[in-house]
Image (spheres, grey):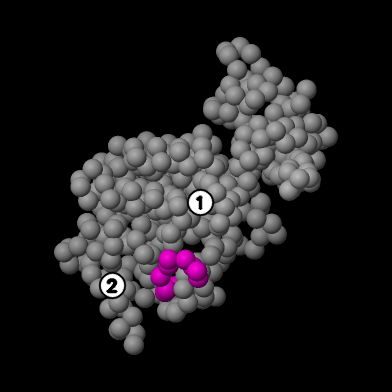
Amino acid sequence: RFRCILCIMFASDIVAHGALGAGQGWAHPEVRLLCEASARPGYDSSRAHEFKEAPGVFDLKIEVLCDLLKRSRSTQAYTGAGISTASGLGDYATQSPDSVTAQGRPQLRTHFEAQPTAAHHALVALHESGLLHGWIQQNHDGLPQKAGYPQGSLNEIHGSWFDPSNPVVSMSGQLRSDLFEDMQRRIQAADLVLALGTSLAGMNADQCVTSVAERARSHGALGAVIVSLQQTQQDGIAALRIFAPIDEMMEAVCGRLGLVPRRSPAPGLNPVEEVFQVAYGEDGARLSEGRTRALDLREDAQVRVVAGPYAGCEGEVVGQQKEGHVKLRIMVPVKKLRAPHVVVLGGWWVQDALAGTAAAIPVVSIL
């Protein structure tokens, strides 16, 4: 029965290695964990078996990946929950308590406490070296920004815990139209996509992988690289398929490229009440050169959300989190009424506003 499982899951080199590994004579991945449960019940997913690369094959695949990164003119990362499990955050696809991802996972009191993983820091290093040109993030956790990735280069397609203008989208919810259009523009321009820690179970945003892979078949792109412990339904269209923990894989990539990821403190605010002068107007858009407007984040200061589903909702500052992120209580529409709702503004929004690097800001003061 064990052999039958392997035959079904690795019926070809392409499924085991991707198109670039077909015919190379590489051994197929080895089993880490057998788990018959579906990785994503109710979605188009595979069983929750976990695999690892055979000895020597992992290094060969890292070499191929680094070559793709150097050749690519436009690389986008497309990340799922698997990139953040080492931070202590849970995922949907892990179905066994014996999973590799469950080992040594920090215990968090609240998901806001999560800190970036080695993979987040490595992706920032790739971005700063010019090898990663954008990041499409399924997660809501703010870990890319905490690792130093610029908000303006990030598309949080499924919502964010740290952006009042971008509430988390439910599984049956509708994606924000402007973010969806931005995602499509990115993918149309990309010739390489790194799908890291996502089960690719049929979400709308999975076109990040399928679109680039389709263009690769006609030599219009380099293709998709899929990295996870579990198999996905899209493995057969990958240019390169790697079965490994995301942290281990990204650290190996940086090592081969000679990159040393920096681990800066997560961006937040000093635990003091302050009024900031920023070059953004009452609609959140950039002002003309030399002009500024106050952004008052002192407790009880009045604020307004200026974008997304909560555009026009008003409220007040209620305090700061431990890391220095700002808590707001805004009145949001609930049927025909309005109800109070607590949201969080990531400290990096203020830092980006002060530096003038944000295209727009999601919250403004009511002056």
Q: Disc 1 marks which amino acid? A: Gln
Asked whether 144 or 6 is in front, the reply is 6
Q: CA distance from mark 1 to mark 2?
A: 27 Å
- Find disc 2 in the rendering and name its residue: 10
> Magenta span has 23?
no
Left or right, residue 59 beside residue 266: left
Part of the protein shown in magenta:
40-49
Residue 238 falls in which quadrant of the image? bottom left
- Find disc 1 in the rendering and name its residue: 138
Q: Main secondary structure of the magenta part?
A: loop
Q: Disc 2 marks which amino acid? A: Phe
Farthest residue to the top: give it. Answer: 290
Residue 324 percent location from the top left of the image: 70, 41
* Residue depicted at 55% across the width and 49% down the height: 174
Asked whether 101 or 76 is in front, the reply is 76
Quarter of the image with the N terminus in it: bottom left
Mark before the other along the chain sequence, 1 or 2: 2
Residue 333 percent location from the top left of the image: 73, 44
Residue 53 percent location from the top left of the image: 32, 67
Does any portion of residue 63 appear in the rendered image?
A: no
Residue 318 percent location from the top left of the image: 80, 40
| Picture layout, residue 43 above or below residue 206 | below
* Residue depicted at 60% across the width and 42% down the height: 166
Quarter of the image with the C terminus in it: top right
Labelled disc at residue 307: none
Per the image, label 1 sits on a secondary structure element best described as loop
Asked whether 313 or 275 is in front, the reply is 313
